[in-house]
């Protein structure tokens, strides 16, 4: 990820687990064949709220999908939000923001488009309303076929559209309704005129589980009262709650810029001030749509309302912070990046290059004990190995403190990157993620390759230690990029490690579909014999002591590099 796209419709599902979930206050209507009851839109708020009974969703944890206890037990279903909103050609708000927010939160999102807007970072240049009959047709297509958990509404440009939505929700009840009463864009352009207010008051708010107006929209719903302070927001939340929605969230994005970003949540009993720091950025276009979609997504996963709102607010804050410097368009209000990776350097121009098996040629593995013995830092060890011609580096710092290790690893990443040499971390997926290393190397009893892959994503390099053809086969099936085979010879760096010898190495290389690097007791005296086994999958040697348990790392690396080059020529 790293490119802004105006037409792409993202979809992703990530893992999540639901147990004992409860949706605050929605009326539950038991439906035959579902262990997770379908819940109808609740009655007006002046009728007594039903007791909060937890709903239960059976979960297949490894897939992260809700499993319905329907007749067909093999059917997996992912939480589903339907957004009923307008399209924003600039993709910062509207349908496009909803799709991205749901994708980022791991929820399926279907779409009913109510209007098409010609819109960019400058403002709204045109609005084309979809005829209400066609909105109705879209609603029917989705709701009659798919199991929608939560409906979220955005731009509803005509009273007729509000009416058909109301009818459709009566006909096809869902578990929760999130209403974002979109009226005016931040650029000041009207997206739904005042005639819509009656539609909200009469038809939608009494059905809503939550309504999320910004300051201007709250003011419009209340007939134009001024809202400038947090106290005003509280009074507004209470007054809007009286119109029927179960919960109200007044968004304070438009409060004075000197203040924190404060939203007021009211559940009919208690007020909550939800605060986050105000991110200094022009890229706030679509925060409202995103917040409402994220609330809907969390509800679809089974969160309570308050926790859904808190998660959504934190998500928006993190996404804004992460995107504060991105530049899309020339106007005053830029979009932000929903599919953030929560990493500081994704927007760098640096792009990981694809793994090249020839990188395994001279594989330097650091060792904290040896570095200590010779009085060198990890970073000096890495620098010198690269100077001598190491083609890939692995940090294997078994007894370093995590915080120190991370700091050194970050510096090593910079050094390696500036020389085009991949840097891997031994065992520690957390460190690899935190320093954005090129990948990891894991042993047979470390984290499984499949789990490491899920955490690291498709681009990172994963190597795995294997002693047998069976382990090598497994590594290939599990999606590793290379295997390390050994120990070939006895070594001090791994006490009690069974050696496989040159024969064992040959067997593994001959059967492996992945490139192999030989490891264990290899140095200048025996590297030639290793490379001479002559199996094409063997791409190089990994070395610890022969480089790092020496006075000059660069000199030893250079010597070994020369020797390997000569051997490679003679083996060919
Ligand atoms: N600069 C900011 N820093 C942090 N949070 C912000 C900032 N601006 C808005 N927010 C938060 O984003 C969410 C959306 O609020 P906002 O008032 O911007 O909605 P909105 O006007 O409907 O947005 P839009 O119409 O652009 O989609 C709220 O939780 C708000 O506190
Ligand atoms: C289509 C659309 N929906 C909602 C908003 C509010 O941000 C917008 N600007 N455009
Ligand atoms: Mg808004």
Image (spheres, grey):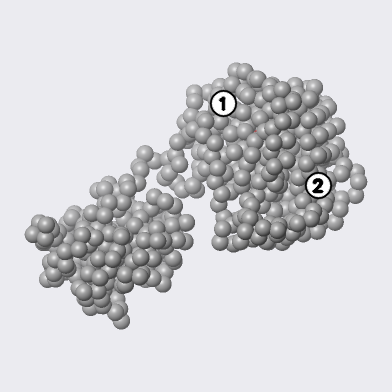
Q: Where, quadrant-wise, is the N terminus in this rendering?
A: top left
Residue 30 relative to residue 565: left or right: right
Above or below: residue 205 compared with residue 423 = above
Of label 1 and label 2, which has the lower sequence position?
Answer: 2
Q: Quadrant of residue 448?
A: bottom left
Identity of the residue drawn at 32% across and 46% down = 353
Identity of the residue drawn at 55% across and 24% down = 120
Marks 1,2: beta carbons within 8 A: no
Image location of residue 389, percent across then percent down: 18, 55
Disc sitting over residue 40 in the figure: 2
Identity of the residue drawn at 77% across and 59% down = 54
Image location of residue 187, percent across then percent down: 62, 23
* Secondary element at tag 1: loop
Residue 436 relative to residue 101: left or right: left
Image location of residue 342, percent across then percent down: 50, 48
Above or below: residue 348 compared with residue 446 = above
Asked whether residue 371 appears in the rendered view, the answer is no
Above or below: residue 271 compared with residue 505 = above
Within 10 Å of disc 1 (Cα), the crowding (few <14, some 14-19, many 20+) is some
């Amino acid at each position: 990820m790293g490119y802004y796209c105006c037409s792409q419709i993202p979809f992703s599902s990530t893992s999540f687990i639901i147990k004992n979930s409860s949706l605050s206050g929605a009326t539950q209507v038991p439906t035959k064949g579902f262990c997770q009851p379908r819940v109808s839109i609740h009655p007006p708020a002046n009728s007594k709220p039903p007791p909060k009974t937890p709903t239960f969703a059976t979960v297949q944890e490894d897939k992260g999908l809700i499993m319905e206890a329907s007749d067909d037990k093999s059917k997996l279903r992912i939480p589903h939000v339907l957004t009923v909103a307008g399209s924003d050609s600039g993709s910062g708000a509207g349908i496009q923001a909803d799709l991205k927010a749901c994708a980022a939160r791991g929820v399926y999102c279907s779409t009913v488009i109510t209007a098409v807007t010609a819109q960019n970072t400058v403002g709204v240049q045109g609005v084309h309303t979809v005829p209400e009959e066609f909105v109705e047709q879209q609603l029917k297509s989705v709701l009659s076929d798919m199991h929608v958990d939560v409906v979220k509404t955005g731009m509803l440009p005509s009273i007729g559209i509000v009416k058909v939505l109301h009818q459709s929700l009566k006909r096809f009840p869902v578990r929760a309704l999130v209403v974002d009463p979109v009226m005016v864009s931040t650029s000041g352009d009207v997206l739904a005129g005042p005639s819509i207010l009656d539609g909200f008051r009469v038809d939608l708010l009494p059905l809503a589980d939550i309504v999320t107006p910004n300051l201007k929209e709250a003011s419009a719903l209340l007939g134009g009262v001024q809202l400038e302070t947090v106290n005003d927001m509280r009074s507004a939340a209470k007054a809007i709650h009286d119109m029927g929605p179960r919960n109200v969230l007044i968004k304070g994005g438009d409060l004075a810029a000197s203040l924190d970003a404060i939203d007021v949540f009211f559940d009919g009993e208690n007020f909550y001030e939800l605060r986050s720091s105000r991110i200094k950025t022009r890229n706030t276009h679509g925060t409202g749509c995103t917040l409402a979609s994220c609330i809907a997504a969390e509800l679809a996963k089974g969160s309570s309302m308050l926790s859904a709102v808190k998660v959504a607010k934190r998500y928006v804050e993190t996404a804004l912070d992460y995107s504060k410097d991105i530049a899309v368009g020339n106007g005053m209000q830029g979009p932000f990046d929903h599919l953030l990776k929560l990493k500081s350097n994704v927007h760098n121009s640096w792009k990981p290059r694809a793994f090249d098996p020839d990188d395994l040629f001279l594989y330097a593995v650091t060792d904290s004990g040896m570095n200590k013995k010779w009085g060198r830092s990890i970073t000096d060890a890495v620098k010198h190995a690269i100077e001598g011609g190491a083609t890939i580096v692995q940090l294997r710092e078994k007894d370093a403190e995590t915080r120190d290790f991370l700091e050194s690893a970050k510096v090593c990443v910079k050094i390696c990157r500036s020389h085009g040499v991949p840097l891997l971390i031994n065992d520690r997926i957390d460190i690899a993620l935190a320093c954005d290393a090129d990948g990891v190397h894991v042993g047979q009893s470390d984290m499984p390759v499949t789990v490491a892959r899920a955490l690291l994503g498709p681009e990172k390099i994963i190597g795995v230690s294997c002693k047998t053809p069976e382990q090598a086969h497994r590594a290939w099936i599990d999606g590793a990029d290379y295997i390390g085979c050994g120990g070939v010879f006895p070594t001090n760096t791994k006490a009690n490690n069974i050696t496989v010898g040159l024969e064992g190495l040959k067997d593994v290389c001959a059967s492996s579909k992945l490139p192999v690097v030989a490891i264990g007791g290899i140095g200048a005296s025996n590297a030639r014999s290793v490379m001479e086994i002559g199996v094409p999958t063997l791409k190089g040697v990994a070395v610890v002591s022969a480089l790092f348990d020496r006075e000059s790392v660069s000199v030893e690396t250079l010597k070994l590099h020369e020797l390997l080059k000569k051997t490679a020529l003679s083996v060919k």
